[in-house]
Every structure is written in structure tokens, then in C-alpha cells.
Image (spheres, grey):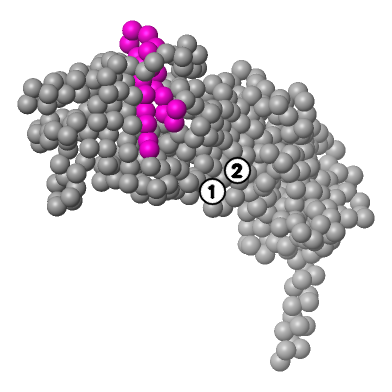
């Protein structure tokens, strides 16, 4: 029985070939097209797909090159030679590779047409090169579309014209930018341990580190500013989270407007060796170091990741996030953070006089007795005094006031603490101008050149003097 089917099939195949040949010679469409019996033609490229070394779509300027077999550490086979370090969208690259290698003629339209213009092949709409390793280049020319959503095509150097499938339309529209992953790395704000930003407003450094202040019984881990201030300054956590969220939104992920092909980050013209702006973030995943260089046209700047060759285009609006950032935006505003459970005494020097408030916890640790020069203070007066002390908040910073450092303070406050590693904490307020005093912490106004509204300080001095008068009269 099987032999009978073979004998019947062979004459049918011969007839089909003869009919197709007659149709080609006569210029008619093969009858088999309508009946769905048209023979399947092989793809233009008949070699080993793994042997293809490069693919070029000349009409869009896209070229892909297979990595050398010696590059065993490469995670992906293909690169974009115009920017060899650029990360690629692997799934889209593979679609282009498969479409180009698998491009197949549907049927022969003309064996040797006299006029290629009838098919749009006198000036081809597209040109696709496939170059196998050690072999000859195969070039497929794409012409006009047909009425049935196919397209005319031919192999360069061969006379026949074919129709090809929809893959041709896909290949005609692929641009390099579609295949390049221009996404910048990102970071997680809650995991950031270090931030360094440099821009037109100067440079700031934030790190998560041990910090000594008067608010804890021991040294604690906290975010501190180590630059531009001469001494570490406590950071406001909420402000830092907001800044990090804004930097992540503006300068990570899909924010670049493509890459600059055939450009290397070490090109002096791009300004990346001496960047205008710089951001370095360290989190649990590693270090993200972004360099932003010279203007790239009217609306962009060149950008690159440190140590990598790929150059990106970043819009000016993205870079503005770095330009707007000021160190003071991150500073914790409390002039002094003091845990009064640790306080044994508070000493004030104001208007040439000294005052001492002691804290007596004997007999009732939860309700200590505050004494001003040995006279107990009323509960309402204690509440007002603590409110004034805790309400001292810095209002700005300055470049420092060299003259203020030589002036006597308007008010100096010293806390005596039950804390061996930090037994004394002091803060002073020095004259600056008609609106502000300079805050002196740690014995140096230059260490943290912050300003405080003088009305807040004067109100505290008035309260201390008034309470002292009450105790004296009492």
C-alpha cells in the first residue's frame, strides 16, 4: 500500500512543477496560489544561522555583529558596533536576527524582468546584508509593497524578483534606538548608605555612619553630612528620602533620550573626563556613579556611567535635579537634639550673667524637680523653658562669619549629661546681623555656619532672665 501512494504522489509533483513553470513563462499567476498548493521556497540565506557574523539594515543604519567565540564571558551574542558597550534589548535584537536570517521568498514573480522600476527595485526601499563567518555576503533588496501586504524583493547579483512576507516590513522599520537599552541603573532609597553629589552649588557628601549627639545615651548610626561642612552634621531623614526619590525619578531608569552612537566617554569634547555634574550613590547593590558633561545640542547634555564607554543624552530638565540640590536642604533643623532623661544640669550664660538649672530625680525619676539656682521652678515654667529649648531651629546657612567667631555669644547653653562618652554638650549664638545669629556647636562657629532667627534666641534669653527674677523675688 505505501508504494502505491508514492507512485501516485510523484506524477502529481511533476505536474505541479510544470504548471508553475508555464505560469512563469506566460506571465500568469500560478493556479496553485489560489488553491493553496504553491510550493514552499527556501529562505534567501540557506547556511547555518549560527554562522552569520553580522547583519546590516542599511536603510535605517542598523548593524548587528556577533561576538567572537573567544568572548566566553559575554552574556549576549550580539553587539551594536557603533556603540559596542551599549546594553541591548535582547528580545528585540533576537527578533531582528531571526527575521533577517529567516527572510523567505513566497513566490517567484519574474525570472529576468526587463524593468526593475515596476517592482521598486531600481532604487530599493531597503537593503539587508547577511555576512556569514568566512563566507560571501548575501544582500537582499526590498522593493515596493504589493496589493496583498507582501513586498517585492530580489537578491543582489541575481535577476529573479520575488514576493516576501511581512517580515520585510518589520525589517524596514527597525531603528537602532529601538534595540538599545538606554535605561540607566537605579537604586533603592531606603538602602542607600552613601550619596555624593557635585554640581554648580558645590559638593555634598552624605553617609550612614556613627554619630555622637546629645539625644542618645550612646553613639548611634545616622545619616550625616560630611561635606561641605567642616564637621559632621546630622541629616533630616525625611528630607533625605525625598531627595533620593527625586534623584531616582530624574536620573535612573528610562530617562535618557537614547545613546550617542560612535561616541566614547573618554572623548574630551563630551566633557565627561571633567564633568559639570556628578552623582554617586552606594546601596546594597553596589555603586551607581553618573557623570554629566558638556551640552549636547540645545536641550541635552552628554552623560555616562563611570568606567563604561556608553554615552547617553540626558535632557536639561533631568540634570536640573542636581543643580537644585543644596546641602542645607538635608540638614536636620533642630539646633540641639537633647534627651532630657540624660540631663543633670543646664547652664546658661546671657547678657553677662550665668544661670544654672539642675535636674533632681531623687525620689521620682519620672517627675524630676527642676531648680533654677537651687529654687524649684513651677511646672508651667519648666514646660515653657523646655518648649523654648526644644523649639530652637536653624533657618539657613552661610559661608561663615569670620567676625562672629571673635565676638562673645549673646547666649550660650551647656548641657551636663549623665553620659560618659558625651558628658557635655554646648551651643552658642553669636551676633551676625539684624535678623540672625550664628549658631556655634562644638565650640566652633566655622564648623557649622548655620543661622537662627534672633527673635527665637532673644525670647529664650528673656524667659531665663524673667524666671531668674521670679526665683530671686521668691
Cβ–Cβ below 8 Å for labels 1 and 2? yes
Count of numbered badges drawn on the protein: 2
The image's mark for residue 283 is: 1
Locate the N terminus by quadrant.
bottom right
Rendered image quadrant of residue 311: top right
Instruction: Calculate the distance from the C-alpha at mark 1 to the C-alpha at mark 2.
Output: 8 Å
**x, y percentage for residue 336?**
34, 33
At a point 48% along the width and 49% down the height, the residue shown is 191
Is 171 contained in the magenta span? no
Whether residue 170 is visible here, answered yes or no, is no
Residues in magenta, as a range? 424-443
Is 428 contained in the magenta span? yes
The foreground one among 133 and 346 is 346
In this rendering, which labeled residue sits more in front, label 1 or label 2? Answer: 1
Other-residue count near label 2 (Cα within 10 Å), few / some / many at <14 / 14–19 / ≥20: some
At a point 14% along the width and 46% down the height, the residue shown is 367
At a point 74% along the width and 78% down the height, the residue shown is 9
At a point 30% along the width and 23% down the height, the residue shown is 349
Rendered image quadrant of residue 307: top right
**x, y percentage for residue 334?**
33, 31
The image's mark for residue 288 is: 2
Secondary structure type for disc 2: strand
Residue positioned most to the bottom: 1
**x, y percentage for residue 411?**
31, 21
Q: Earlier in the sequence, mark 1 or mark 2?
A: 1
Amino acid at each position: 500500500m505505501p508504494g502505491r501512494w508514492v507512485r501516485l504522489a510523484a506524477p502529481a509533483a511533476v505536474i505541479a512543477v510544470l504548471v508553475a513553470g508555464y505560469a512563469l513563462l506566460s506571465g500568469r499567476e500560478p493556479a496553485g496560489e489560489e488553491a493553496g498548493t504553491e510550493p514552499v521556497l527556501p529562505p534567501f540565506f540557506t547556511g547555518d544561522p549560527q554562522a552569520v557574523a553580522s547583519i546590516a539594515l542599511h536603510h535605517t543604519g542598523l548593524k548587528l555583529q556577533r561576538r567572537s567565540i573567544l568572548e566566553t564571558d559575554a552574556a549576549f551574542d550580539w553587539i551594536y558596533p557603533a556603540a559596542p558597550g551599549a546594553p541591548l534589548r535582547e528580545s528585540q535584537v533576537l527578533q531582528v536576527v531571526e527575521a533577517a536570517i529567516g527572510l523567505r521568498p513566497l513566490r517567484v514573480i519574474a525570472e529576468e524582468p526587463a524593468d526593475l522600476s515596476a517592482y521598486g527595485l531600481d532604487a530599493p526601499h531597503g537593503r539587508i546584508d547577511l555576512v556569514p563567518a568566512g563566507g560571501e555576503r548575501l544582500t537582499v533588496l526590498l522593493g515596493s509593497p504589493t496589493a496583498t501586504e507582501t513586498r517585492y524583493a530580489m537578491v543582489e547579483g541575481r535577476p529573479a524578483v520575488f514576493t516576501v512576507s511581512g517580515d520585510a516590513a518589520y525589517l524596514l522599520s527597525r531603528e537602532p534606538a529601538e534595540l538599545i537599552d538606554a535605561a540607566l541603573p537605579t537604586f533603592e532609597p531606603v538602602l542607600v548608605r552613601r550619596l555624593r553629589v557635585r554640581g554648580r552649588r558645590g559638593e555634598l557628601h552624605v553617609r550612614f555612619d556613627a554619630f555622637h549627639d546629645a539625644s542618645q545615651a550612646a553613639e548611634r548610626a545616622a545619616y550625616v553630612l560630611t561635606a561641605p561642612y567642616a564637621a559632621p552634621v546630622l541629616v533630616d531623614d525625611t528630607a533625605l528620602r525625598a531627595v533620593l526619590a527625586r534623584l531616582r525619578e530624574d536620573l535612573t531608569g528610562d530617562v535618557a533620550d537614547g545613546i550617542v552612537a560612535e561616541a566614547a566617554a573618554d572623548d574630551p569634547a563630551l566633557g565627561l573626563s571633567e564633568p559639570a555634574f556628578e552623582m554617586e550613590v552606594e546601596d546594597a547593590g553596589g555603586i551607581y556613579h553618573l557623570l554629566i558633561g558638556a551640552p549636547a545640542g540645545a536641550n541635552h547634555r552628554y552623560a555616562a556611567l563611570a568606567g563604561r564607554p556608553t554615552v547617553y543624552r540626558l535632557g536639561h530638565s533631568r540634570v536640573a535635579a542636581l543643580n537644585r540640590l543644596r546641602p542645607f536642604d538635608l540638614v536636620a533643623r533642630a539646633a540641639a537634639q537633647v534627651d532630657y532623661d540624660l540631663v543633670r544640669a543646664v547652664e546658661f550664660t546671657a547678657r553677662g550673667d550665668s544661670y544654672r538649672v539642675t535636674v533632681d530625680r531623687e525620689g521620682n525619676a519620672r517627675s524630676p524637680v527642676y531648680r533654677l539656682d537651687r529654687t524649684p521652678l513651677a511646672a508651667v515654667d519648666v514646660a515653657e523653658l523646655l518648649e523654648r529649648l526644644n523649639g530652637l531651629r536653624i533657618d539657613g546657612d552661610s559661608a561663615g562669619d569670620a567676625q562672629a567667631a571673635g565676638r562673645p555669644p549673646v547666649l550660650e547653653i551647656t548641657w551636663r549629661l549623665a553620659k560618659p562618652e558625651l558628658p557635655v554638650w554646648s551651643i552658642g549664638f553669636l551676633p551676625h546681623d539684624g535678623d540672625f545669629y550664628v549658631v556655634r556647636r562644638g565650640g566652633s562657629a566655622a564648623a557649622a555656619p548655620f543661622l537662627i532667627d534672633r527673635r527665637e534666641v532673644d525670647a529664650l534669653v528673656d524667659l531665663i532672665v524673667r524666671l531668674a527674677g521670679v526665683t530671686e523675688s521668691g
